[in-house]
Image (tube, rainbow, N blue to C red):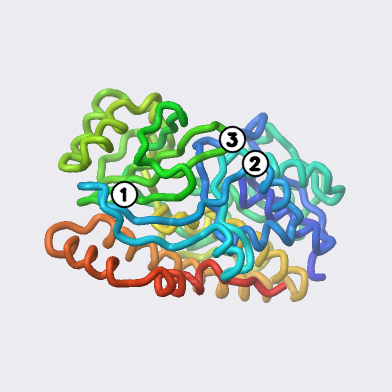
């Protein structure tokens, strides 16, 4: 192998997965996290087969399967009249077609499963409550007591590790807001699917709903055009922001507007995305996950891309000299991330279509059989990372 030890900045999904993937290759790591304890912000998460394939290789999937739900379908529905537009089967179909399951779960369920695996892995050491003072190997070595051969920036969209890489990506506001909240099973209207993922589509906005077993309720995410605040992260939605949300969903079905109006403690998330840029410095520092390619959630692939990045990076650094490994990793993953982003951009256009485009979209979707819709996802859900 080209390295023996790595320092990982950030103990989110990208960082914890990277530690486990490196350990699988016999590479030890120190994971440095500024938070005094781990607790994922947000609620629901979709894990598609390309991600669960990696988690199975790392021995984490069986833990998740005890807590999650496998939706029987991923459906598109009109937000104006609740008319079904199209559906891709999931459940047993996903396992058969793409080899691994499609699951929905609470974000903390995944983080805690990864954390348990890390704590049981002797090659991984977790350092909580440690604010990074410098990204260089010397500075991190003084924090952990072990100078790393490789520094991995897995510290999210607002990465500090990015500062150590000349020409690295920058993040900017996308012009869209995500409104996240949950509702109880008992308080949910009957039209919400109890066993599927549903995206309700409308002009300039869409709403995603799916059940969460852990809370006996539903996760809902409404995404629409909006203005950012002075905050760059999740904040509670005040009266003005609630009014902005309802304005974006004017003309939608009354039952959906009622859900949005009565949401308890919704959070307001300005959505940011990363530009193109360098993911590594050519020597000993590399970015993964949102630190490298924060993207819009229109393909539900943010977590999956971080998980793929971590697994791919470990494979590359285990079999090639470090500068070559970083270069080949970056080339491979940039191509993959760009294709996923392009799919998300297409989905954004299709989901938020208005006027004649909306009518055309609905006609095209109604004419495409489920098998064709599933085939369109083979490149995404069936992706395999060389090991």
Mark 3–mark 2 Cα distance, whole angstroms, equals 7 Å
* Residue 60 in the image: above or below residue 321: above
Residue 94 place in picture, x, y as percent? 56, 63
Q: Going 50% across and 41% down the picture, which residue do you hit?
A: 44
Quickly name the residue at label 1. 200
Mark 3–mark 1 Cα distance, whole angstroms, equals 23 Å
Q: Going 56% across and 40% down the picture, which residue do you hit?
A: 106
Tell whether label 2 touches label 3 (CB within 8 Å): yes
Task: Inspect this view and state whether residue 285 appears.
Answer: no
Q: Which mark is residue 214?
A: 3
Q: Secondary structure at mark 2?
A: loop
Residue 157 place in picture, x, y as percent? 49, 48
Mark 2–mark 1 Cα distance, whole angstroms, equals 26 Å
Q: Going 65% across and 43% down the picture, which residue do you hit?
A: 11
Q: Residue furthest front?
A: 190
- In which quarter of the view is residue 226 placed? top left
- In which quarter of the view is residue 25 placed? bottom right
In the rendered structure, which disc, 2 or 1, sits on the residue that comes first in sequence?
2
Q: Nearer the viewer, residue 241 or 64?
A: 64
Q: Residues within 10 Å of mark 1 (few under 14, many from 20)?
A: many
Q: Going 79% across and 65% down the picture, which residue do you hit?
A: 3
Q: Secondary structure at mark 3?
A: helix
Q: Which mark is residue 67?
A: 2
In the rendered structure, which disc, 3 or 1, sits on the residue that comes first in sequence?
1
In which quadrant of the rendered image does the N terminus lie?
Answer: bottom right
Q: Nearer the viewer, residue 366 or 375?
A: 366
In the rendered structure, which disc, 3 or 2, sits on the residue that comes first in sequence?
2
Q: Residues within 10 Å of mark 2 (few under 14, many from 20)?
A: some
Residue 215 place in picture, x, y as percent? 55, 32
Residue 156 place in picture, x, y as percent? 53, 48
Q: Secondary structure at mark 1?
A: strand
């Amino acid at each position: 192998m080209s390295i023996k030890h790595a320092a990982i900045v950030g103990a989110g999904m990208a960082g914890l997965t990277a530690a486990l993937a490196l350990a699988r290759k016999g590479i030890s790591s120190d994971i440095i996290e500024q938070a005094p304890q781990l607790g994922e912000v947000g609620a629901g998460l979709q894990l598609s087969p390309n991600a669960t394939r990696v988690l199975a290789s790392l021995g984490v999937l069986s833990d998740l399967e005890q807590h999650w739900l496998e939706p029987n379908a991923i459906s598109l529905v009109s937000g104006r009249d609740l008319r079904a537009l199209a559906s891709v089967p999931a459940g047993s179909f996903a396992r058969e077609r793409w080899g691994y399951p499609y699951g929905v779960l609470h974000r903390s369920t995944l983080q805690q499963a990864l954390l348990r695996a890390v704590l049981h892995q002797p090659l991984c050491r977790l350092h909580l409550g440690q604010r990074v003072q410098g990204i260089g190997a010397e500075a991190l070595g003084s924090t952990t007591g072990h100078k790393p051969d490789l520094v991995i920036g897995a510290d999210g969209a607002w990465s500090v590790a990015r500062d150590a890489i000349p020409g690295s990506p920058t993040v900017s506001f996308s012009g869209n807001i995500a409104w996240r909240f949950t509702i109880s099973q008992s308080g949910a209207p009957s039209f919400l699917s109890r066993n599927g993922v549903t995206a309700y589509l409308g002009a300039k906005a869409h709403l995603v709903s799916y059940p969460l077993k852990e809370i006996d309720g539903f996760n809902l995410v409404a995404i629409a055009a909006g203005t950012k605040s002075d905050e760059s992260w999740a904040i509670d939605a005040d009266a003005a922001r609630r009014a902005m949300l309802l304005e974006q969903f004017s003309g939608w079905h009354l039952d959906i507007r009622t859900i949005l109006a009565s949401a308890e403690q919704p959070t307001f998330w300005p959505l940011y995305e990363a530009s193109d840029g360098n993911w590594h410095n050519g020597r000993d520092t590399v970015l993964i996950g949102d630190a490298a390619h924060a993207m819009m959630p229109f393909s539900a692939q943010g977590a999956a891309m971080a998980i793929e990045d971590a697994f791919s990076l470990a494979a590359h650094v285990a079999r090639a000299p470090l500068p070559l490994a970083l270069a080949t990793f970056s080339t491979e993953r940039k191509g993959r991330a760009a294709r996923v982003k392009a799919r998300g951009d297409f989905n954004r256009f299709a989901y938020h279509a208005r006027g004649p485009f909306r009518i055309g979209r609905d006609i095209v979707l109604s004419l495409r059989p489920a098998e064709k819709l599933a085939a369109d996802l083979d490149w995404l859900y069936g992706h395999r990372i060389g090991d």
